Image (spheres, rainbow, N blue to C red):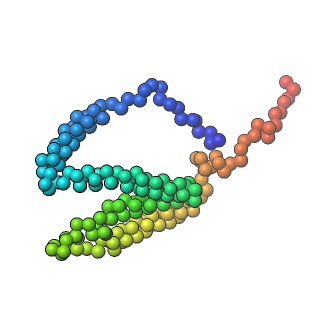
């Protein structure tokens, strides 16, 4: 046991405050206006195609992306012990994943038109590779800096790691001395 007090539950019901109500009061009319625009401009917005895209996106998220992220997190948790290395790897993986998701339509060339060669004219796959390389290079620099900082500061003197490294205190190991008084 680490000796830290166990977390306690709040004494009463947790109150969310006014923020959800303000969000609903402001957000619902905005969503209604957007939904109205989808149907008023149906020729250009193509509501059926939009609906398929929204449902498909939700399904891909729930059935593909979430399981992949959960498996990657579980593997990372099992393979890399807690500490700066796990934190940096988590950041690198998450950032790389977000970059890949955002860049995917561009890398695949969705929307590219032969009649407009200036549309999506860059090499997006190379750009994605460069950005992901930069993310991992930053992660490596952070890990090296953390390693150097730890070596210079010496062993930890307090905190959880020091308590875990210290031998457990035993009541039997402390002799009781009596003067007979």
Which quarter of the rendering shows the C terminus? top right
Q: Nearer the viewer, residue 63 or 131?
A: 63
Is 13 left or right of 153, judged from the image as shown? left
> With 6 as the anchor, is 140 left or right in this view?
left
Q: What residue is at 57 percent from the left and 35 percent from the top?
A: 6
The number of numbered discs placed on residues in the rendered structure image is 0
Report x, y in % for residue 94: 42, 58
Q: Position of residue 83 (x, y in %)?
A: 54, 55
Query: Residue at the location (16% across, 44% down)?
Result: 36
Residue at the image position 52 percent from the left and 32 percent from the top: 8
**Which one is nearer the viewer's eye here, 64 or 91?**
64
**Side of 26 relative to 138 (left or right):** left
Query: In terms of image quadrants, where is residue 30?
Result: top left
44 is higher (above) or lower (below) than 170: below
- x and y percentages locating residue 51 in the rendered image: 26, 51
- The quarter holding residue 116 reads bottom left
Residue 52 visible in the picture: yes
Image check: 139 left or right of 51? Answer: right
Residue 122, relative to residue 57: is it above or below? below
Q: Position of residue 73 (x, y in %)?
A: 50, 55
The quarter of the picture where residue 102 lies is: bottom left
- Front-lying residue, 41 or 161: 41
* Residue that sits furthest to the front in the current view: 48
Q: Is residue 149 visible?
A: no
Q: Quadrant of the N terminus?
A: top right
Q: Residue at x 17, y 54 (%)?
A: 45
Q: Residue furthest right?
A: 180
- Is residue 129 placed above or below 27 in the rendered structure? below
């Amino acid at each position: 046991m680490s000796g830290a007090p166990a977390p306690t539950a709040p004494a009463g019901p947790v109150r969310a405050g006014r923020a959800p109500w303000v969000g609903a009061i402001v957000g619902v009319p905005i969503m209604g206006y957007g939904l109205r625009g989808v149907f008023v401009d149906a020729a250009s917005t193509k509501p059926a195609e939009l609906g398929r895209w929204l449902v498909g996106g939700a399904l891909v998220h729930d059935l593909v992306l979430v399981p992949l992220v959960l498996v990657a997190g579980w593997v990372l948790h099992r393979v890399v012990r807690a500490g700066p290395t796990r934190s940096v790897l988590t950041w690198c993986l998450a950032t790389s994943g977000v970059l890949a998701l955002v860049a995917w339509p561009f890398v695949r060339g969705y929307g590219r038109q032969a009649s407009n060669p200036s549309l999506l004219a860059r090499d997006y796959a190379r750009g994605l590779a460069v950005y992901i390389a930069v993310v991992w290079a930053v992660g490596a620099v952070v890990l090296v800096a953390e390693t150097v900082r730890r070596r210079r500061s010496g062993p930890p003197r307090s905190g959880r790691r020091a308590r875990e490294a210290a031998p457990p205190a035993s009541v039997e190991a402390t002799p009781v001395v009596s003067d007979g008084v």
